[in-house]
């Protein structure tokens, strides 16, 4: 019966962690789950409580810092021109093999077609295939 109580406590603590997001209740839930496994062996109540305290403290001091560092890292923002590859752009000036202009991400770029035989007219929507210095290499979807 003790193992079932510890298992329910672990499930409740893990569920409450979803609302909090600090990894505190998750560590207590992991301690309760560990204690549920130990309680299956039929140990006395004092051993279950000792197991809960020791395992929760171990999870708290060893696992929580790793999880905290791993999941609370700031996201890296890529502001290089390479981040524009794959974006869609509107053609402002018709171009063929020599080049033209497109508007993408709020700015105007010089552009040339990936396929020199393509003629792209103003108003078409193209996709950026590559950035070659200050020139966007684009292709038109058919």
Image (cartoon, helix red, strand yellow):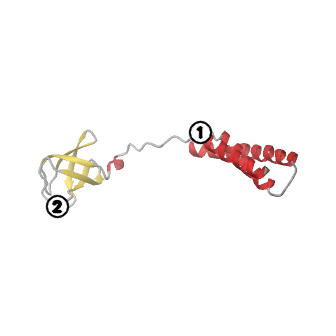
Q: Nearer the viewer, mark 1 or mark 2?
A: 1
Question: Is 22 placed above or below 6 here?
Answer: above
- Rendered residue at 66%/43% (across/down): 12
Q: Quadrant of residue 26?
A: top right
- Rendered residue at 80%/45% (across/down): 54
Please state which of residues 23 and 109 is positioned toward the viewer in this rendering.
23
Q: Is residue 106 left or right of residue 28?
A: left
Instruction: Please tell me which of labels 1 and 2 falls first in the chain.
Output: 1
Circle 1/circle 2 CB separation < 8 Å:
no
Q: Which residue is mark 1?
A: 21
Q: Is residue 93 left or right of residue 57?
A: left
Local SS, label 2: loop
Q: Quadrant of residue 68?
A: top right
Crowding near the residue tagged with mark 2, few <14, some 14–19, many ≥20 C-alpha atoms within 10 Å: few
Q: Is residue 43 left or right of residue 107?
A: right
Horizontal and vertical percent position of residue 112 = 20, 54
- The C terminus, quarter of image: bottom left
Q: Which residue is mark 2?
A: 116
Please state which of residues 139 and 38 is positioned toward the viewer in this rendering.
38
Horizontal and vertical percent position of residue 124 = 16, 50
Local SS, label 1: loop
Residue 141, labelled with which disc? none
- Rendered residue at 26%/38% (across/down): 106
Crowding near the residue tagged with mark 1, few <14, some 14–19, many ≥20 C-alpha atoms within 10 Å: few
Horizontal and vertical percent position of residue 11 = 66, 47
Question: Is 84 placed above or below 97 here?
Answer: above
Please state which of residues 47 and 83 is positioned toward the viewer in this rendering.
47
Task: Tell me the distance, in whole angstroms, between the alpha carbons under discs 1 and 2.
Answer: 53 Å
Q: Quadrant of residue 15?
A: top right
Horizontal and vertical percent position of residue 87 = 29, 49
């Amino acid at each position: 019966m003790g193992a079932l109580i510890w298992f329910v406590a672990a499930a409740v603590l893990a569920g409450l962690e979803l609302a909090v997001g600090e990894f505190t209740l998750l560590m207590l839930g992991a301690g309760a789950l560990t204690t549920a496994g130990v309680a299956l062996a039929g140990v006395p109540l004092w051993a279950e409580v000792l197991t809960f305290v020791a395992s929760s403290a171990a999870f708290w001091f060893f696992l929580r810092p790793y999880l905290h560092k791993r999941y609370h890292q700031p996201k890296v923002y890529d502001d290089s021109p390479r981040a524009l590859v794959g974006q869609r752009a509107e053609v402002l000036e018709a171009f063929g093999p020599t080049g033209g202009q497109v508007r993408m991400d709020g700015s105007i770029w010089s552009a040339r077609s990936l396929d020199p035989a393509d003629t792209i007219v103003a108003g078409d929507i193209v996709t950026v295939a590559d950035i070659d210095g200050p020139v966007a290499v684009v292709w038109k979807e058919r």
